[in-house]
Amino acid sequence: MEWKNRADAVIIGGGILGIATAYYLAKMGMRDVVILERGTVCCGSTGRCGAGIRAQWGTEMNCRLAIATIGIFEHLEDELGMSIGLNQCGYLLVAYSAQELANLRSYMKLQNELGIESRTVSLDEAREICPALDAGDAEGFTYHARDGHADPFLTTYAFLEAAKGMGVVCHRKTECTGIRIKYDAAVGVSTSKGDIDAGIVINCAGGYASQVAAMAGVDLPNWGERHEIMITEPVEPGICPPMLMSFSGNYYIQQRPHGSIICGMSPAGHHHSAECGTTWQFITRMSRVLNRLLPATRDIRVVRHWSGLYDMTPDGSPIIGETDVKNFYHSTGYSGHGFMLAPIAGKILAQHLTGTQPDIDFSPLDYRRFARGELITEPNIT
Amino acid sequence: MTGMTYEEKVGNTVICRCEEVTLSEIRDWIGRGYDTVTELKHVMRVCMGPCQGRGCRDIIMREISQAAGIPLDRVEAGAVRPPVKPVKTRLLASGDD
Ligand SMILES: Cc1cc2nc3c(=O)[nH]c(=O)nc-3n(C[C@H](O)[C@H](O)[C@H](O)COP(=O)(O)OP(=O)(O)OC[C@H]3O[C@@H](n4cnc5c(N)ncnc54)[C@H](O)[C@@H]3O)c2cc1C
Ligand code: FES
């Protein structure tokens, strides 16, 4: 592939954040956009995720980002000209105590005020939405029909193919090894294949974002947290029509259109981790949860089990914006919801960088908020 | 497959039976630059079926080797994930934790 020594923007990371951002920059008229990916596209968290999309959040910022991103997802196949495997099946959130249900209801009130049509549903209605569900021990449910899930590979490649069509260059197997700085501004990058001068450098390195930030002397408080996930053989549709999720129950379960069931839970203890890997404890506990909630899954076989990193921040909200090093930007720290936020996050950062008013003001997501103590703590996560 | 042109044969030859992917689809994506098992797996689900690629991985690696002009033993096989042999959840649920 052609190697250019200079670019308007260099993006570090070929996950969905880097690629969606490149797509929007090109779409908004930026000429030379280069993506650097040290492995292959989707080899990081993006290719390991559940690809769930929901607007049932507990902070105003996440609600605004999420409902805007759902609006983009709904038209993405037409826009990009490729299938993204979108399945708008709704998220059924399950509460197991009066307190948890009261919390879900208060977030629902916030969501409704922001135009998100989430609602509470009765046990009977929950059974209509998910007939195989055994949730006699549940206290209550909330549901939002426009939530759902997509295929993370297809979505990322759809953005990439559309971006390439507008001249974006993506170098695979090319590692960013340094950020070049002159005075107080980034002027380019060093890579395993040579240097590139750049007007703007964007850190989209996911679970490795703090290492990349450190190349420019910028200190990010991010850390990696390993999350495991598994998938079954394809089975008849209807075992789990909605995305089932519970914060206290610590699970999410979905059935993809091709029939496989994908499910995950958060690790006990939430330890910091830099490596992926799998444990028997996960597969045992997850299978128990699955069998209890959906007894029809008992004879279904698990075919794969893997893990990926959540790129965590102290408040569970992302970091978007410029750093103390001029022209060096971050779009990182998406913990367990970077897949769904990528379209809107890519769009608003590209709007800002091409001189348009962003659809959503992301200045509160500046990384200096941690030093200022202005955290945006998201309660609706497992 | 008698009476078919070469293109028709390639188009109809199913390489990944689990996910019903044909040789021409595989060649098409390799031609678009998706020339690793990992990337082909992502775009077409090859090697992700119940057999986990036992039926198709070798043929796909041979196609990559030919298209990219690299020896077969230098084509990366991609990640093989546990549990390797499909296991019923009820059996997994009965394990120790
Ligand atoms: C098990 C699991 C389930 C999840 N479920 C969901 C979900 O349901 N919904 C949702 O929205 N999100 C989910 N997520 C979160 C989601 O996967 C991430 O937030 C999202 O994929 C982040 O995308 P990214 O592009 O920032 O990072 P990544 O996809 O990790 O991409 C970063 C890329 O940067 C590359 N890179 C790193 N350092 C360098 C360097 N020095 N030079 C060049 N390249 C470099 C890496 O190789 C990597 O490919 C889940 C995550 C996991 C692990
Ligand atoms: S033949 Fe390709 S996964 Fe089974």
Image (tube, coloured by chain):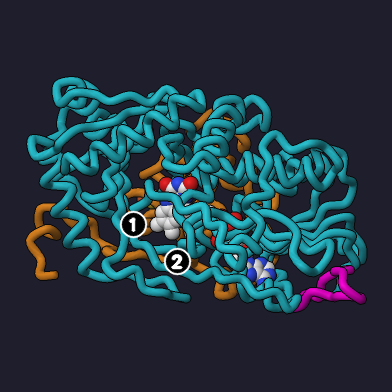
| Image position of B39 with respect to A101: above or below | below
Tally the marks.
2
In reply to whether residue A284 is colored magenta, the answer given is no
Q: Which chain hosts label 1? A: A
Q: Residue at x 75, y 76 (%)?
A: A216
Residue A61's disc is none
Q: Quadrant of the N terminus of chain A?
A: bottom right
**Residue A192 can be seen, yes or no:** no
Chain ID, mark 2? B
In the rendering, at what x and y percent does residue A378 appear?
44, 50
Residue type, label 2? Ala
- Around disc 2, counting alpha carbons within 10 Å, would you say few (fewer than 14), some (14 to 19), or many (20 or more)? few
Q: Tell me whether circle 2 and circle 1 mark residues in contact (CB < 8 Å).
A: no
Residue drawn at (10%, 70%), measured in percent from left and top?
A: B96
What chain is the orange one? Answer: B
Would residue A175 be found to the left or right of residue B61 on screen? right
Looking at the rendered structure, the secondary structure element under dot 1 is strand
Q: Colour of chain A?
A: cyan
Pick the residue in front: A223 or A291. Answer: A223
* Secondary structure state at the residue bearing disc 2: loop
Is the residue indicated by label 1 positioned so its CB lies within 8 Å of ligand 1?
yes
Q: Position of residue A225 (x, y in %)?
A: 42, 68
Q: Position of residue A280 (x, y in %)?
A: 22, 69
**What's under tag 1, amino acid-wise?**
Ile
State the residue position of label 1: A229
Q: Which label lies toward us, 2 or 1?
A: 1
Give the answer, above or below, for where A31 lies relative to A281.
above
Residue visible at 50% across and 71% down? Answer: A223
| Label disc, if present, on residue B79 of the rendered structure | 2
**A180 magenta-colored:** yes
